Image (cartoon, coloured by chain):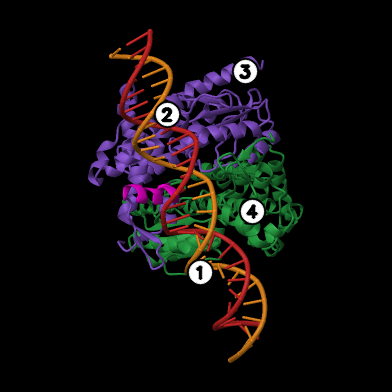
Chain colours: A green, B purple, C orange, D red
Amino acid sequence: MNTATFNIAAVERDTGLSKDVLRMWERRYGFPVPSRDSNGERCYPAEQVDRLRQIKRLMDLGHRPGKLIATPPEELGGLASRRSTSATVDMAADDGELSELLALIKQHDAAAYQQAMQQRLARQGLQRFVQDTVAPLTRQVGEKWEDGSFEVFEEHLYTELTKRLLRQAIATLPGGPRGPRVLFTSVPEEAHVLGLLMVEALFALEGAECIPLGTQMPLLEIGRAAAAHQAEIVALSFSGAFPQRQIPGLLHQLRLILPEKTALWVGGSGVARVPRSSDAELITTLDDALAALTTWRLQHA
Amino acid sequence: MNTATFNIAAVERDTGLSKDVLRMWERRYGFPVPSRDSNGERCYPAEQVDRLRQIKRLMDLGHRPGKLIATPPEELGGLASRRSTSATVDMAADDGELSELLALIKQHDAAAYQQAMQQRLARQGLQRFVQDTVAPLTRQVGEKWEDGSFEVFEEHLYTELTKRLLRQAIATLPGGPRGPRVLFTSVPEEAHVLGLLMVEALFALEGAECIPLGTQMPLLEIGRAAAAHQAEIVALSFSGAFPQRQIPGLLHQLRLILPEKTALWVGGSGVARVPRSSDAELITTLDDALAALTTWRLQHA
DNA sequence: CTTGCTTTTTTGTCCTAGACAAACACGATG
DNA sequence: CATCGTGTTTGTCTAGGACAAAAAAGCAAG
């Protein structure tokens, strides 16, 4: 297992750091320093790939690469919580029950987790389940992942199982003929969908007609889909890991592509730091989303 | 809407063609020829992006780029069927019923499609539903998409709705304590999951313990997950669009990362042309998958 | 005519190294 | 304390060259 080494394409795939960035870091900071194969191409050892992934993780949290690369690897784990602190305080409420759920994931007990969540869903009803269980749980998984107490694959397991629960719940709702037609999707390179699903669940409950197109739609295709479905609203989501600098340009382009009367609503942790603009409506919380729906209905009554 | 132009990163995102390839084609073939902005950077008009996506689509089908770029745009649509022809013949069987389902997607009538599929599922049972409905339907959607009679977003709609159905069906099955523990996932950059879900459904029916980790797991994380879950089998899937040349190296690496006793099973249309090797077991049909499971059980009884 | 091997063409990826602009951090001024 | 420069950090783009892997074409032998 130690003989495995990664070429630059594999490192890009596994860390999400572009080849350009990898080469630039090597030039500027002297890390990573891969060995070379017989063709002079870079060979990264698994150890450096792991450190790179850790660095990427902390960068998505807001740290600067220069500092991170200067930090010795063994101290990296400690840098976790940063913008988490403010959020953690005001939600210590029913931590107790939630951490039981987290513990099930941590034990990799998928069956028990699913059962516990099903019960909670039955007890709380879908709306409160989304707002009081799924949303805080997702936040906590994010934090645990950030501070290293959750592995990537544990976060994936959580996401996958929870997605299934939400989709299942949504499927039982009747398609609402009363609300606006809302098209749910994300741009290419953006694969996260859990937040979008939460909003879809809430909107479906409100009787909106939800059209889920999955993730990763090319922009021009989003335009075609909106036209074909005569969607009144296009709802997009960006995760925190999505390259922030691309977002404004991307929204501007999409705005040009979409019919004028189609609203563009954008949410997810990736847009928290994006400047407001007339291209799209930025939505940062689930409550915002519901409020936006209410407002839309008033304006189109 | 005509004022929208794409920079090279946006084109890479939307077409799946790497920046290197885009620049290379410009150098070698003289297409695409983007205009330049004030910084000398490439600006691709929407029209060229569309043509590029069409070319990429045909390349995934086996065509050569040199020919495609030489072909005038208006003739591109006609080049569709190629390796499809052989397959279409032997399945003209119950085309009738299936094409009704396809028509519902084409009309963007999500509700009716879901209802029709639910009925079929109830009538056929999960195994036959997967083998006789979902699998051929997916193949046909692929073909329709290839020959241009399905838009990308229609294929997305089909995929999303069908994924939901399968997941829902899987959720109702008891977790099997008898079979092997099978970990289902895909590598980064590979977002397609429908084929994996079909296999998961069949395996779950057979009483195997299925652990769905969603898509896009870094290789080292797949290794950790396999260890943590004590998985006996890791099942991966590659779509036809995944860069073929990366697959063998990738499987070799993963083989080095995984514990020796963990089997590596790989399927999907992307592996059809991959050379056989001792790194992984290549599985090309649903029947193969079931056969592999049976064999595994015999060998570990 | 087909099968299998070798050569040529096609094609993608990697390389170096420089330029620049956008984002950020810091300090000064209102 | 807030707002506005200014310097530093950082990512992305550009250029063309080199090379190897894949596909096609040519050719030989069964």
Q: CA distance from mark 4 to mark 2?
A: 38 Å
Return the x and y of residue A184 as percentages of the image width and height.
44, 52
| Number of other residues with Cα within 10 Å of mark 3, as a class: few under 14, some 14 to 19, many 20 or more | few
Residue, disc 4: A57
Vertical arrangement, residue A119 with respect to residue A135, above or below: above
Sequence order check: which comes first, mark 4 or mark 1?
A: 4
Sequence order check: which comes first, mark 2 or mark 3?
A: 2
The kind of residue on which mark 3 rests is Arg
Q: What chain letter is assigned to the residue under label 3?
A: B
Viewer-nearest residue: A14 or C17:
C17
The nearer-to-camera label among 4 and 1 is 4
Instruction: Say if residue A209 shows up in the picture.
Output: no
Q: What chain letter is assigned to the residue under label 2?
A: B
Q: Secondary structure at mark 3?
A: helix
Return the x and y of residue B112 as percentages of the image width and height.
37, 40
Viewer-nearest residue: B64 or B116:
B64
Q: Residue at x 57, y 21 (%)?
A: B293
**Range of the magenta residues?**
B15-30
Viewer-nearest residue: A73 or A236:
A73
Task: Identify the mark at residue B135; answer none if there is no mark.
Answer: 2
Q: Is residue A122 left or right of residue B131?
A: right
Q: What chain letter is assigned to the residue under label 1?
A: A
Q: CA distance from mark 4 to mark 1?
A: 23 Å
Q: CB atoms at circles 4 and 2 under 8 Å apart?
A: no
Q: Is residue B89 left or right of residue A63?
A: left
Task: Identify the mark at residue A275; answer none if there is no mark.
Answer: 1
